Amino acid sequence: MTVETDPTRPATAVDIAAILVRNCGLDPAAAAGRAGESSLAELGLDSLAVLELQAVAAQTFQVQISDDALGMTIAEIAEQVNRGRVTADPPVGADPPVGADPPGHTENSVFIAAPLPLVWDITNDVARWTELFTEYAEVEILDRHDDVVRFRLTMFPDSNGAVWSWVSERRADPDRREVSAHRVETGPFEYMRIHWRYDELPDGTRMTWTQDFAMRPTAPVDNAAMTDRINTNSRIQLNIIRDRIERVYRESAASARTASTGSGS
């Protein structure tokens, strides 16, 4: 179920159902059958699905869905979204409010001269991210089932000695070679969603990070400043990841050649 959301029209139950199927694990048959009279909990969804729905709705509609959405029907959620949009959205064609800080959005990519399966395996081995990124001091796996992993990341102390830590969740789609992730503990963010895309090219792999987020009013930086920070840091980390994966690929290729030569002698 795929629905393109037009920001100028009201959200419908079909729009919300599409998000729940695409991003939150709702069974398409359940969405088509009992969605009208059943709450999200009765449809088999849990609090993690609500967190993902809140993140997608914040990005798509710029509206915060309430925490009690688990007890609401899909139609009731659509109504809540539209009530929020009436309050939050300016009239079509109107100038944005002075000082408005639109949600943050970044997209950065890197070409890695290594096969896609190797890039996929290394970058999705979350438990070993301290070997892949230079900014993470510790990774703690909290839960793992199927292609979903929930984990805590802890960074090295910053220039002021502060240590930042938060819980995130990743949902991998090996068939489409995509990963969707969001912060469960959002900290200074209203929401933070990250999409990883892997494209297979003749000589390697292009890996792309897309991040959508908004800062809380109490955060020390606004959306624009955080956008600059994320763009700068993403480019640094992507280049580091590229170099480390390419080194692994070269070393494995060299070992394979040595083994092949030895077996023939």
Image (tube, rainbow, N blue to C red):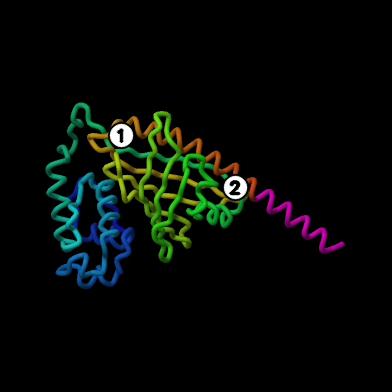
Q: Position of residue 185 (x, y in %)?
A: 31, 48
Camera-side residue of 48 and 12: 48
Look at mark 2 in the image and give the residue it sits on: 245
**Does residue 33 show up magenta in the picture?**
no
In this view, 1 is above or below 94:
below
Give the residue drawn at x 22%, y 31%.
100
Look at mark 1 in the image and give the residue it sits on: 223
Mark 1 element type: helix
Mark 1 and mark 2 residues within 8 Å of each other at the beta carbon = no
Q: Quadrant of the C terminus?
A: bottom right
Give the residue drawn at x 58%, y 55%.
118
- Which kind of residue does numbered mark 1 sit on? Asn
Dominant secondary structure, magenta = helix
Q: Position of residue 69 (x, y in %)?
A: 18, 58
Q: Position of residue 90 (x, y in %)?
A: 16, 37
The residue at the far front in this view is 161
Q: Position of residue 127 (x, y in %)?
A: 49, 54
Span highlighted in magenta in the image: 249-265
